[in-house]
């Protein structure tokens, strides 16, 4: 299945059914009168986040969605049925924007969340509503109101606890394949990863989700390489794991390049907690390790982890560091986390 994280669709809610013009004509009824029923309301267009989806690929093959028109009113005061709704099922983490692709309509972050995108038109009144003392046989009824028609953008941002960032071939996919059951493509050429990937890592009987995105290069925010569009998939993460390859001649410069792209992208990525690791350390000797570790430490201001996903060196330490930040963020986000503190302050 292909990965698609952005799609444009056209939606239209149903029109309301027309009211009926009708009169009672039963035998042996002395006084008749109008009995035209109202039209039914048009169907609505909803968006719903569901489990089991992690891509918007379905909306590549169908872009037009129209709810059903309400049934027209009928005689004997029968109201028309409401038109059937249309539900756009999307993965959790999907944002929906107006046609300008900038105005946010809703953000569906949890399975089961629903949002009304377009309300169906109301049904028209039948002629029974227009009966008066001076007009006891009205021959008019209202048509149904039109539905809402517009184009919207669906944009998926994966929901993960930790995100992997770095230059192409920094070892991100190898790390993801080592610590999770994910099977990303791994090769010795740049931009092996073309689409984001997710995996569930487990350490000390605890689990968290890791997101891997295509590598960044200098100028990615200007469209160089694959660009920085996929950075949206690590916006929701609680911590970033920044991998710098030990094969780089100047690891400090490489670190600053990626940090510059994060800052240029914005959306709070540069302010997220960050764990830095010198990856692929199995490819260099001890002296090179010390030299490059020191250069990377000067650039990032903290002591980086030494990591080799191929041999397993440092993997557990990095996972525990990530898990620590994730659990701390989860505790802060939990409902009532600060109830005790607030009680004592009161």
Image: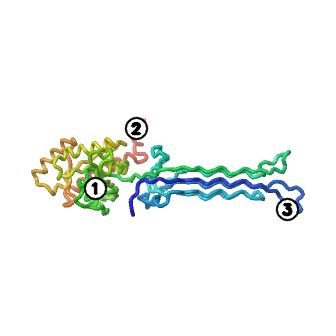
Circle 1: element type: loop
Per the image, label 3 sits on a secondary structure element best described as loop
Please name which of the two marks, 2 or 3, marks the residue nearer to the observer.
Answer: 3
Identify the image quadrant of residue 269: top left
Q: Position of residue 28 (x, y in %)?
A: 89, 62
CA gap between label 2 and label 3 equals 77 Å
Q: Which residue is mark 2?
A: 344
Label 2 to label 1: alpha-carbon separation: 53 Å
* CA gap, disc 1 and disc 3: 78 Å
Q: Identify residue for label 3.
A: 26
Which quadrant does the N terminus fall into? Answer: bottom left
Name the spot of residue 225 as percent of width and height, x first. 30, 50
Q: Residue furthest top?
A: 346
Q: Nearer the viewer, residue 344 or 319?
A: 319
Task: Name the quarter where the C terminus is drawn.
Answer: top left
Q: Closer to the N terminus: mark 2 or mark 1?
A: 1
Please tell me which of labels 2 and 3 falls first in the chain: 3
Q: Secondary structure at mark 2?
A: helix
Asked whether the viewer can see residue 330, the reply is no
Q: Can you identify the residue that label 1 sits on? A: 191
């Amino acid at each position: 299945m292909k990965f698609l994280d952005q799609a444009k669709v056209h939606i239209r809610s149903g029109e309301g059914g027309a009211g009926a013009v009708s009169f009672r004509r039963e035998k042996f009824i002395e006084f008749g009168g109008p009995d035209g029923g109202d039209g039914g309301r048009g169907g609505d267009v909803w968006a719903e986040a569901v489990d089991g989806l992690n891509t918007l690929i379905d909306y590549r093959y169908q872009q037009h969605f129209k709810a059903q028109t309400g049934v027209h009113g009928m005689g004997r005061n029968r109201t028309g049925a409401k038109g059937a709704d249309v539900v756009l099922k999307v993965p959790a983490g999907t944002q929906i924007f107006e046609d300008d692709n900038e105005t946010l309509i809703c953000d569906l972050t949890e399975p089961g969340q629903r949002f009304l995108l377009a309300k169906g038109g109301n049904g028209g009144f039948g002629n029974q509503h227009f009966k008066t003392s001076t007009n006891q046989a009205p021959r008019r009824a209202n048509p149904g109101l039109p539905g809402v028609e517009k184009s919207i953008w669906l944009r998926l941002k994966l929901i993960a606890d930790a995100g992997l960032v770095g230059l192409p071939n920094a070892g991100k996919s190898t790390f993801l394949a080592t610590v999770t059951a994910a099977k990303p493509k791994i090769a010795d050429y740049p931009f092996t990863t073309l689409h984001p990937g997710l995996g569930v890592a487990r350490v000390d009987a605890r689990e968290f989700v890791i997101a891997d995105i295509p590598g960044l290069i200098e100028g990615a925010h200007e469209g160089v390489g694959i660009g920085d569009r996929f950075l949206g998939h690590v916006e929701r993460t609680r911590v970033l794991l920044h991998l710098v390859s030990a094969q780089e001649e100047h690891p400090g410069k490489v670190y600053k390049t990626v940090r510059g792209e994060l800052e240029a992208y914005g959306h709070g990525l540069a302010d997220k907690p960050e764990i830095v690791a010198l990856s692929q350390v199995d490819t260099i000797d001890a002296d090179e390790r010390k030299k490059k570790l020191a250069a990377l430490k000067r650039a990032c201001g903290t002591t980086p982890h030494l990591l080799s996903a191929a041999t397993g060196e440092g993997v557990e330490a990095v996972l525990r560091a990530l898990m620590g930040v994730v659990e701390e963020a989860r505790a802060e986000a939990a409902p009532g986390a600060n109830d005790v503190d607030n009680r004592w302050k009161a």
